[in-house]
Image: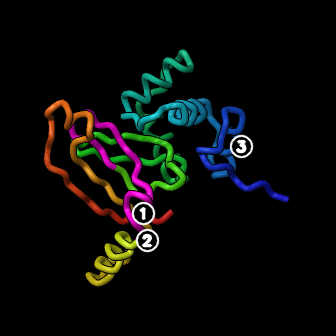
Amino acid sequence: MKRSSPTPAETNANDWMDCLRSHGLRATTASLAVVRCLSRSDQPLTHAELGLAVEEADARAVERVTLYRVLERLIAAGLVLRYPGPDGTARFGMPKAQAIGHFECNRCHRIIELSKAVVPPKVLEHLSRQLQGQGIASGELSLAITGTCSQCSAAGHAEPMVVMARPRRAR
């Protein structure tokens, strides 16, 4: 019986090679280092932050272009998510099981996953119907919300909230 491929949340360090291969990827030194670093991080990382984390963890640097290519392959396989930030900087992180979107603070860039408990499925269904009414065929829909987190608001750095609904690319 074929074992189902593990999700990133269920994967421990010993299973990363199998996880990558089960998603059709080669388990290269660079790809293993990237998934290990992202799985250990409690927040999505920028390309630069990830490069430093890989270098610290493995005591060797991964070239910038290699890191971009590894990230693109991991994103295409659904193992990593790209979070486009309001500041134009992309951040990369492991998908959470029940996440249907994310909130990013405009000040500190902390990312908080949004679950179905925060965004009821009926809201996404309504958005999907509205898009279809405009002739847009959307697959999976996720939300990207930016604004000011509670910590930055408490420090007096409140900014207006911006909500963007983007259809996810088909995998």
Q: Secondary structure at mark 1?
A: loop
Q: Which residue is mark 3?
A: 18
Q: Residue at x 81, y 57 (%)?
A: 2
Q: Earlier in the sequence, mark 3 or mark 1?
A: 3
Residue 57 is situated, as x and y percent measured from the top left of the image, at 54, 20
What is the quadrant of residue 122 in the picture? bottom left
Q: Residue visible at 49% across and 20% down?
A: 55
Q: Magenta residues?
A: 103-121
Q: Is residue 29 above or below residue 130?
A: above
Residue type at the position of mark 2:
Gly
Q: Is residue 155 left or right of residue 57?
A: left
170 and 83: which is toward the camera: 83
- Reply yes or no: does residue 114 show up in magenta: yes
Name the spot of residue 81 as percent of width and height, x first.
45, 48
- SS class, disc 3: helix
Total number of numbered discs in the rendering: 3
Give the residue type that dot 3 points to.
Asp
- Reading the image, the residue beneath label 1 is 169
Task: Inspect the magenta stretch and tell me whether residue 126 lies in it.
Answer: no
Q: Earlier in the sequence, mark 2 or mark 3?
A: 3
Three-letter amino acid code of the residue under disc 1: Arg
Kindly report the distance in space between the C-alpha atoms of the residues bearing marks 2 and 1. 7 Å
Does residue 138 appear to the left or right of 165 in the view shown? right
The residue identified by callout 2 is 139
Q: Residue drawn 48% across and 32% down?
A: 41
Of circles 2 and 1, the one toward us is: 2
Q: Are marks 2 and 3 in contact (CB under 8 Å)?
A: no
Mark 2 neighbour class, 10 Å CA radius: few under 14, some 14 to 19, many 20 or more: few
